[in-house]
Image: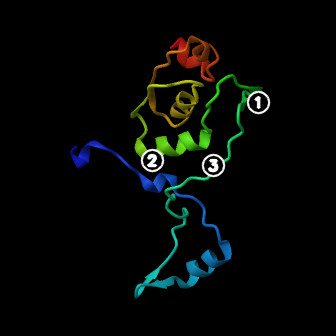
């Protein structure tokens, strides 16, 4: 694969630093590491390889109301946001071959990406979070 055929933007998924007092000190004075002075990034640290994301399993706030969802493997919105932000730009196409609950289509639209989704289960299509995408 040609290195120009993929996209990854680590800057778009930075996460807050854990120790704010240490970071505030480092912003003023820097941190000496391997003989070089380092200053923390204002947007946070690079996203770690392992993500800790809390999931509100089977519940989602839609149009201001908390609703129970009927899908066994709903992914947390924050997880989908990180994946889409890191791997695409506005206007890019997001493909979800197992659309399930429709969470990816909602997030893709919120992030101004185009979306194509496939789902084999008509039950999941009928209970999809994204009713608009089904009618498009």
> Marks 1 and 3, Cα distance to the nearest angstrom?
22 Å
Q: Where residue 127 sits: x, y (%)? A: 64, 17
Q: Secondary structure at mark 1?
A: loop
Which mark's residue is nearer the viewer, 2 or 1? 2
Pick whichever of labels 1 and 3 is earlier in the sequence.
3
Q: Can you name the residue that lies furthest to the bottom here?
A: 35
In the picture, which quadrant includes the N terminus? top left
Closest to the camera, between mark 2 and mark 3, is 3
Tell me if residue 69 comes above or below residue 31 in the rendering: above
Q: Which element carries disc 3, helix, strand or loop?
A: loop
**Residue at image coords 60%, 43%:** 78
**Mark 1 or 3, which is nearer the eye?**
3
Q: Residue at x 53, y 55 (%)?
A: 50
Q: Nearer the viewer, residue 63 or 102?
A: 102
Q: Which residue carries the number 3 mark?
A: 53
Q: How many marks?
A: 3
**Which residue, as the protein is rendered here, is positioned at the far left?**
2
At horizontal 63% and vertical 49% (from top left) the residue drawn is: 53
How packed mark 1 is, by other alpha carbons closer than 10 Å (few <14, some 14-19, many 20 or more), is few
Toward the front, the furthest residue is: 72
Residue under the point 49% across and 56% down = 49
- Element at badge 2? helix
Residue 102 image position (x, y, % from top left): 57, 25
Dot 2: within a 10 Å radius of its alpha carbon, few (fewer than 14), some, or many (20 or more) residues?
some
User: Where, by quadrant of the figure, is residue 133 drawn?
Assistant: top right
Task: Give the mark nearest the N terminus, 2 or 1.
Answer: 1
How far across and down, in percent of the image, does residue 114 sit?
44, 28
Residue with the mark numbered 1: 64
Please give the label number shown on residue 48: none
Q: Give the side of residue 3 with respect to residue 109, left or right.
A: left
Q: Which residue is mark 2?
A: 86
Name the colour scheme.
rainbow
């Amino acid at each position: 694969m040609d290195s120009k055929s993929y996209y990854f933007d680590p800057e778009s998924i930075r996460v807050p630093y854990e120790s704010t007092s240490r970071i505030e000190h480092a912003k003023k004075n820097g941190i000496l590491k391997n003989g070089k002075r380092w200053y923390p990034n204002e947007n946070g640290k690079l996203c770690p390889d392992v993500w800790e994301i809390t999931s509100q399993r089977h519940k989602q706030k839609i149009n201001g109301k908390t609703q129970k969802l009927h899908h066994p493997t709903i992914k947390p919105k924050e997880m989908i946001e990180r994946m889409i932000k890191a791997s695409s730009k506005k206007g890019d196409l997001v493909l979800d071959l197992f659309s399930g609950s429709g969470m990816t289509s909602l997030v893709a639209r919120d992030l101004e990406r185009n979306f194509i989704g496939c789902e084999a289960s008509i039950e999941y299509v009928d209970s999809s979070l994204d009713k608009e995408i089904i009618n498009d």
